[in-house]
Amino acid sequence: MKRVNSITNAVREIKADLPKKKARKPYTKRVTKDFNVDNALAKHAEAHCQELQKQLNEKAQRLNALDHALIEKEKEVWTLECEVFDKKAVIKYLEEKLFVLGVR
């Protein structure tokens, strides 16, 4: 009997030296942790989406400003073309008058 007791004591000592297993976390805590990670990812994605929307709005405003400037330049070119056309017409008219008068 003494031998059995010593073996039992030896087993208890060995078990005491072994690292104890960690208690398993309840399933709900893991879900909460995953949920928090999902929330963080969602917040990050939302912030990224807002930043992209802001950049898109800035690019759209810049594009509208460039379109407006292009329209103004086209108006200026048209005005200059009309002035040149008018001046050419006046020159042609005066040349015809001089030709009728016989001046070369």
Image (cartoon, rainbow, N blue to C red):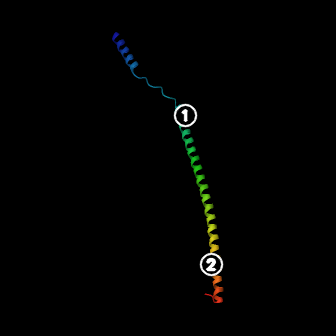
**Most foreground residue, 80 or 53:** 80
Which sits earlier in the primary sequence, circle 1 or circle 2? 1
Please name the residue that numbered disc 2 is placed on: 88
Relative to the observer, which residue lies in front, 44 or 71? 71
Q: Position of residue 25 (x, y in %)?
A: 50, 29
Q: Nearer the viewer, mark 1 or mark 2?
A: 2
Question: Furthest residue to the left?
Answer: 3
Badge 1 element: helix
Q: Check the image and report above or below for 97 versus 85.
A: below
Rendering coords of residue 27 (x, y %): 52, 31
Numbered badge on residue 32: 1
Residue 16 position by quadrant: top left
Residue plotted at (57% across, 50% down)? 55
State the residue at coordinates (63%, 64%). Answer: 72
Secondary structure type for disc 2: helix
Q: Residue at x 55, y 36 (%)?
A: 36
Q: Amino acid at mark 2?
A: Lys
In this picture, is 37 found above or below 103?
A: above
Question: How far across and how far down the image is residue 95, in percent?
Answer: 63, 84
Mark 1 residue crowding within 10 angstroms, few (<14) / some (14–19) / many (20+): few
Seen at 39% across and 19% down, the residue is 17
